[in-house]
Image (cartoon, rainbow, N blue to C red):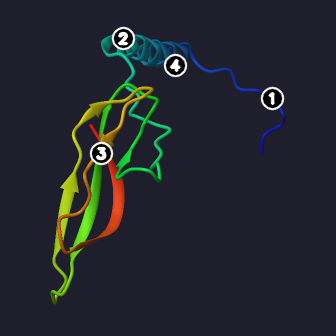
Amino acid sequence: MNSGRMIAPSRWGRRAVAVAVAVVVGGGGLGALAAPAHAEPSGCVYPRTMWGVQCPEGDGEYRFKMVCWVMNTWPRRRNVVYGPWVKAGPGTSSQVAGCPMNNLPMTKTVEFR
C-alpha cells in the first residue's frame, strides 16, 4: 500500500526519459523539413449546368469520373467516362461531354492525385 509518498525516479530513469524526449522532438523537427504539406483539392462542387466538377481549393490535381449504364443489355454493362486532369484552383473544372449514345448516367465522382 502506498503511504502517499512520491517515489523519485532513479538517475538512469531520468536520463532514459530525457533521451526518449530528445529523439521524438528531433525526429519530428527533421520530418517537418523533409517535405512540404500537400493538400488535395477540396470544396468540390458538381454544377447543374455541366457534366463535370469544380474544385476551387487545394494544390493537387483532380478529374471528373462518370459511370454510364448501357441501355437494353443484361447483365448491365457500363462505360466509364473521365474528364481531363486539372490543377485545383478558382475557375478550374474537369468536364465530359456526357455518356456515349444509348447510355444512362448513373454516378458521378471526382478522383484526386
Image coordinates for residue 109, horizontal then vertical, percent: 35, 55
Disc 3 from disc 4: Cα separation: 56 Å
Q: Quadrant of the N terminus?
A: top right
> In the image as oriented, which residue stretches furthest toward the bottom?
74
Q: Which mark is residue 95?
A: 3
> Does the CB distance between marks 1 and 4 fall below 8 Å?
no
Instruction: Residue type at mark 1: give it.
Output: Arg
How packed mark 1 is, by other alpha carbons closer than 10 Å (few <14, some 14-19, many 20 or more), is few
- Please state which amino acid type lies under the numbered disc 3: Gln
Q: Nearer the viewer, mark 3 or mark 1?
A: 3
User: Which image quadrant for residue 60?
Assistant: top left
Q: Residue at x 37, y 31 (%)?
A: 92
Q: Secondary structure at mark 2?
A: helix
Judged from the image, the secondary structure of the residue bearing numbered disc 4 is helix
Q: Amino acid at mark 4?
A: Val
Say if 101 sits above or below 18 in the image: below
Label 4 belongs to which residue? 17
Which mark is first along the chain, 1 or 2? 1
Q: Residues within 10 Å of mark 4 (few under 14, many from 20)?
A: few
Q: CA distance from mark 3 to mark 1?
A: 71 Å
Which of discs 3 and 4 lies nearer the camera? The answer is: 3
Can you tell which mark lies on residue 30? Answer: 2
CB within 8 Å, label 3 to label 4: no
Q: Is residue 6 left or right of residue 76?
A: right
Residue labelled with disc 1: 5
Q: Nearer the viewer, residue 91 or 61?
A: 91
Residue situated in front as seen by the camera: 35 or 93: 93
Q: CA distance from mark 4 to mark 2?
A: 20 Å
Bin the neighbour count of mark 3 within 10 Å (Cα to Cα): few under 14, some 14-19, many 20 and up: many
